[in-house]
Structure formats: C-alpha cells, structure tokens
Image (cartoon, rainbow, N blue to C red):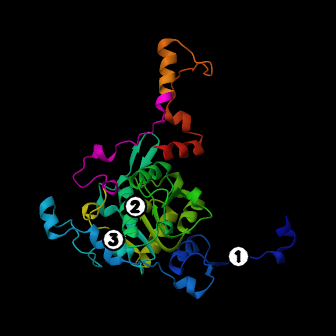
Amino acid sequence: MLSDNQPSSVVNLEHQYRMCEDIMLLSNTLIYTGRLKCGTHAIAQRSVRIPRMEALRQHHHTPSSLMSANLNPRTVCLNPTRALCWIRDLLDPSTKACFVNTDTLLPLSRESETGSRIVNPCEAALCSQLVQSLLTTGVPATDVGVITLYRSQLALIKQNLRQYHPTVEMHTADRFQGRDKEVIILSLVRSNESRNVGDLLKDWRRVNVALTRARTKLLILGSRSTLNGNELLEQFVKLMGSKGWIYDLPKGALEGHIFDDGATPFTAQSSNHEMTKPIKVEAKKSPMKRKRIDSFFHQGQQDENMRPVKVGKMTERALLGSRPVLRDIVNDAS
C-alpha cells in the first residue's frame, strides 16, 4: 500500500473544527487516546445560544393549574429555575456534554421488547420534551438532531415528534454519519436488570459517530446501571462522572411539565401494559387499490392490468430480519 511504501507522506488529521472541547473530550479519551485537538480556541469554547430561556415558563404549571389538574405538587415544576428545573439545567449553555441518568425513574425507564423490537418509551418522551423545550426557547429546528442506534426507538420518537418532522432531523447513528448539529439528543435505549447493553452499543464505530455529531450540546439519555455492564461503556460513565457531567433526573421528571400529548405518552400512573404497547406497522393502501383487490377476489373478475395475487403467511421478523434498509422503511412508515 502507498502508506506502507511512503510512511513520511502520511499525515494524521488531528485538528477538528466541529465539536467544542467538552464534547470532543469523550471520543478523544475513549477512542483517539488524546490525539484530537480543537482547530481554534473559539471552537473549543463555543456554546449553544438560547435566545429566549424565559419562554420555558409556558411549559410550567402555575398554582392555579396545579389545583385544577389535581396534580401532586411534589412532582410538578413551577419555575424554570436552575437547580430546581431539570429542563432548565440541561438547556443551560454551560451544559455542553451531559449523561442524563434515567435510573431514578425506574421502573418507568425500563426498555420494553416486542418480538425483535426494543424500545424505551420513557427515553422517547424525554427526547420529545427536550426538543420541544429547545424550540420554545428559540433554538432553530434545523440546529437540533435526535439520534438512536435502534430503528424501533427512532420510529417511536418520530411518532412523538411528528409535527416537527422532518424539520428536526432524527436518524440512526449510521444515517447521521457525515452530518452535525448544534444540539444532539442521543437515546441509548437499553435499561434492564441484567445490565445487557446489546450488540449495537458494543459497536464503538456507531457509538463514536453518535458522540461526535454535536457542535455545542450533547445530551445522552441512558441507564447508568445498565451501561456499567460493558467495560468500555463503564469507562464512558466513569469519565462523565469524573467531570461532573452526570445528571440524575428527578423522580417526577416525566409529568412535571406541560407539553403536547405526544411528548408524554405515559405518566407515573400508567400501567405496564400501556408502556409496552407495540408499535403498529401497517402498509397503507389507497381506497382504489382496496376496491380493485376486493373486486378481484370476491367477485372473481380480474382487471386486465392485474396479475393474480398469491397469498401466503410470513412473520415480520422473517421478512425484515436480514434487510436493515427495509426495516428502516417500515419503521419510517409506522
């Protein structure tokens, strides 16, 4: 190879011009052994601009709304005040890289599995609330991105944020490669008693892509106890802890604010059945197509442009198992 024959001609690209210093530290420590450097001092120190932080008040209860809704005052947030409001804390420009620990919300924050699909409705709701809060405070939708490694989780997040999609980009880590945003919210999904992180979170190529897409703010939602079940992810958690970048959510985080219904699919009173409700995947047929098919099968009259249809049974897993692109299309349609 050319690099072997001419080693003096090979130059390692050490300077990066995307991430601020705090965000760069993660991949620089865990992957690049300290070789990365910020291209300029300005890039190293940059932070997100929040034009109207006071606008967060519209997502907060007032004493009158608290009484009329018959809510528990211990779980309700009344003011967007630092150290009292978790959303205010995470949106603050000084919070640049943060691991948002969901273990404090157990058992609501557990992952759920339906067949081969793994989702975390709690993290999807938190993503929705954070995205809505960013947009409320004036951060342009084009500056916000949501990433997860799980396609089923992506479909759930898109469903919650359907009124903002496609303005807010939401993709798997693979599809976000080569792109970047001012703010990235990353949903890790896995949260279980066995501390099983799954194969996707063990793939550090994908994880590294997800950790390096944000310019000024990276919020990582996940279970601290589950991540400690993997050696490299445990190093990540220890690194975040050593920098004081782990944020334990308050117990009433999911129900403490006012958001559109799609941002909060369940509350502390929701049953486990409601939490694990499977995502429906249904092919959309036009009324005309339905009429033609019904006419063919029920009346025995075949349109000259139609071929006879063979009817067979196949499970979703068998159909989509080895076709990742097709699985993306199905999830996007759900």
Q: In this figure, which residue is indicated by the disc labeled 3?
A: 87
Give the alpha-carbon distance from disc 1 to disc 2, as whole Å.
Answer: 33 Å
* Residue 156 spot, x, y in % from top left: 42, 50
Task: Give the Cα separation between the discs numbered 3 and 2.
Answer: 11 Å
Q: Which residue is mark 2?
A: 127
304 and 85: which one is in front? 304
**Which dot marks residue 13?**
1
- Residue placed at 41% from the left, 56% from the top? 161
In this rendering, the label closer to the viewer, 1 or 2? 2
Write the residue at 87% across / 70% down. Answer: 5
Q: Amino acid at mark 3?
A: Ile
The quadrant in which residue 223 appears is bottom left
Q: Residue furthest right?
A: 5
The residue at the point 29 percent across, 78 percent down is 83
Q: What is the count of numbered marks?
A: 3
Q: Tell me the amino acid under the disc marked 1.
A: Leu
